[in-house]
Image: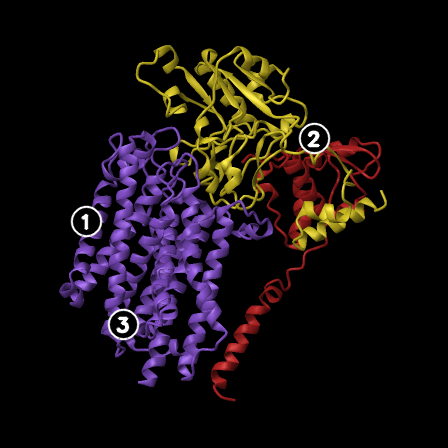
Amino acid sequence: MSMDRREFIKVAGLSALLGVGGKGAFELLRPGELDAFEGQAPENVPAATPKIRWAITIDVRKTDNSVVQKCRGVCDYLHNVPHFDNPKDEVKWIWGDTYEHAFADGANEYMDSSLADLPFLLLCNHCDHPPCVRVCPTKATFRRPDGIVAMDYHRCIGCRFCMAACPFGSRSFNWRDPRDGLKDRKLNPEFPTRMRGVVEKCNLCVERIDKGLIPACVETCPDVLAFGNLADPNSNVRQILRTRTSLRRKIELGTEPSVFYLV
Amino acid sequence: MYDANKIIPGLVIFVGLMTFPIWAGMGKAEPVPKPKIDTPVIKEMAEKHCVESKNYMADYHMQMLITWRDKALRDGKRIYVSSSGQKYNVSLQNTCMKCHSNKKEFCDKCHNYVGVKPYCWDCHIEPIEPKGNVL
Amino acid sequence: MLEKALVGSQRYWGWIIFLLAIISVGFACWIYQLNYGLGITGMSRDISWGVYIAQFTYFVGVAAGAVMLVIPKYLHHYQKYAKVVIFGEFLAIAAVVMCLLFIIVDIGQPQRMLNVLFYPTPNSILFWDMIVLNGYLAINVIVGWNSLLAERKHVPPPAWIKPFIYLSIPWAVSIHTVTAFLYAGLPGRHMWLTAIMAPRFLASAFAAGPSILILLLLLVKKLTKYEPGEEAIQSIAKTICYAEITNMFFLGLEFFTAFYSNIPGEMHGLTYLFFGLDGYHELVPWMWTSVFFGLFGILLLLVPPLRRMHKFLALACASVFLSTWVDKGVGLVIGGFIPNPLDVVRQYHPTFPEISIATAIWAIGALILTILYKIVISVREQDA
């Protein structure tokens, strides 16, 4: 590298201060020469041909309340999701609800109660065409090349446009200091909490995926959930989807969810 | 001068307000802090070194943290290769603070001295120090 | 010219102090909100926008309404508006400032507001709303202030403000179109997902803005020696009448599409607002009040002898103001969130601090308006 790394980071930092966006500064300085970081997914892959598109399948017939509790428990612990008694302040990443609510437009009154009473695990759908990303005025929420709809809590201004845009009710706002909802609870020291005034949601365990692990809910209930690459025709999820009938929520809206419910 | 009775008091108030930081801080000089690195993890290190050199970290840790933040969170690049070729997991809580587990001594003293309040700890969880710091 | 706002009667200062008192209560509540978070409001996970954004939307309309004076005056040289057009422009300034303040109090991290500029995102409608609102504010400040400066010196306004005046016309349309797009482009919010959202917004804006203006002009006429001109007032009244008829017509169109198509999602929002849904009907009386006053206002404005009597004219304008305010400032935003994406009705009740903050922003608007109108009237009384 022709430029000293320290010099480089120094200039990058200064240009970021001067308003040249962080990434822009990197590219201005040394296009393609940013190898102080080891990258997993190569950049500049055209969006049309993703090599990775993470997806989750959920076997509804095997979902019961204990599965919901286990998934929610591990997720809430790992991500320090606050709990408030007051439904007004509620923050949810993954939770359970009935078919009637999960598929609001598809319920019918003659359905067999064996399905109607089952809980459905609800979480962010990590859509292909996420409306929340489209409306965000700061790119605080964005879609990674591997299909994960991520949040940058440092950048979120708390306008809640994404909450209005999400057709699945997957987003929560920190109406108050989330740490008030984490008192007397064991915190996960490896993951941050959030601060008041920002929006949060399921991140598909991006911090685990980047380390080569699978999402915690899938790891906890491997009989019910599966995680894999939708872009790979031989992946586990593709094989499951070939053999099982699946539903996705509100497909008529064209957001293309990555969460499949096996019925 | 017209309206001197209004202009002069006005000027005095203006100058007073503009110099507020100077006289508000007068006589409150604190000793120059010396960040301590006597944490258990660092004590066990054969060769005591940070991700980059001490001087570099002292001068540029803030830029580095911002770069780390954006690279990890936005680009999914969570491995940093230092100038000595060593690889580090890009994480404030899981890399920096694992060694520097004495946040009060290591971070806060300097930050208080220079009068900056980084909001890192609004979200990131401080390492648990001997005296215990639950939320 | 600002010095003219510093001399006034006891009544003038009393009014200013009254407004400042309201502002300080709201300011205290805002400090509380900054410290605790937006949890002090009635908003929730399900109704994530409330009074603040609803008031914002309404006042974008009031601001855009000024164009109903600018078009006749500058495109058709309708000279009866020569003296009143500045009141419209200054009303727009006060309204846009209110809009910006409503956004600031609504966001969770106001200190990071400039991220919208640091990371410009053209695919976000909020980014464009920021541009058009600030632009509209600048245009009206430039045009209004320079026209008044020229008037004081008894010279014609400088030629260079002409392009700004012409620009202000499409710009006024743009602010309310872009604001409608905030809502009308969201999948899954059926009540908002309507192509006539922008025209509906404009129609209600062209009724609401001029209604407030007439009320203000009648007040100015009563409190000062200044005479805005009867013909101008009557012309504005006709504009309101047309606009409010269009507005009610558009509302009818929404009803037709929703209920004739019989699609549940299309009907739910309107059903909640006008008839109640799943046993929740808190807003039903509000919405029918809005319809009643809208029609009542139209009726008064349609009958010329009634319209000419200022008592009835004021009543008509107040009716239209109330009707459009309930429609946009209460029903539109809350109704759009009901039922929530899981088809559950969650209600929203604004809290005292939330209402105090909103009232304080109304008071700031009134304060700006008072000061600007005071300057105009002082300049003109000095000539009289």
Image spot of residue C254 (x, y percent): 30, 41
B49 vs A260, nearest the viewer: A260
Q: Is residue C201 left or right of residue A142?
A: left
Find residue A177 and report its horizontal and vertical position in percent: 48, 40
User: SS at mark 1?
Assistant: helix
- Residue C164 point in image, percent of width and height: 47, 68
- Chain letter of the residue carrying label 2: A
Left or right of C102 on screen, residue B21: right
Question: Does label 1 or label 3 sit earlier along the sequence?
Answer: 3
Residue A11 can be seen, yes or no = yes
Q: Which residue is mark 1?
A: C292
Going by the picture, which residue comes out furthest to the right? A2
Circles 1 and 2 on the same subunit: no
Numbered circle sitting on residue A41: 2
Does residue C365 lie above or below C340 as drawn? below
Of C223 and A103, nearer the camera is A103
Mark pair 1, 2: CA separation: 61 Å
Residue that mark 3 sits on = C220
Tell me residue A225's x, y (percent).
Answer: 54, 16
Apparent colour of chain C:
purple
Whether residue A141 is situated above or below residue C290 in the rendered picture: above
Amino acid at circle 3: Val
Chain seen in red: B
Dot 1: within a 10 Å radius of its alpha carbon, few (fewer than 14), some, or many (20 or more) residues? some
Which tag is nearer the camera, tag 1 or tag 3? 1
Residue C284: assigned label: none
Distance, label 3 to label 2, CA atoms, is 67 Å
The answer to whether the residue labelled 3 contacts the one labelled 2, judged by CB atoms less than 8 Å apart, is no
**Residue pushed farthest front?**
C76
Residue at 57%, 43% in the rendered image: A139
Chain A pictured colour: yellow
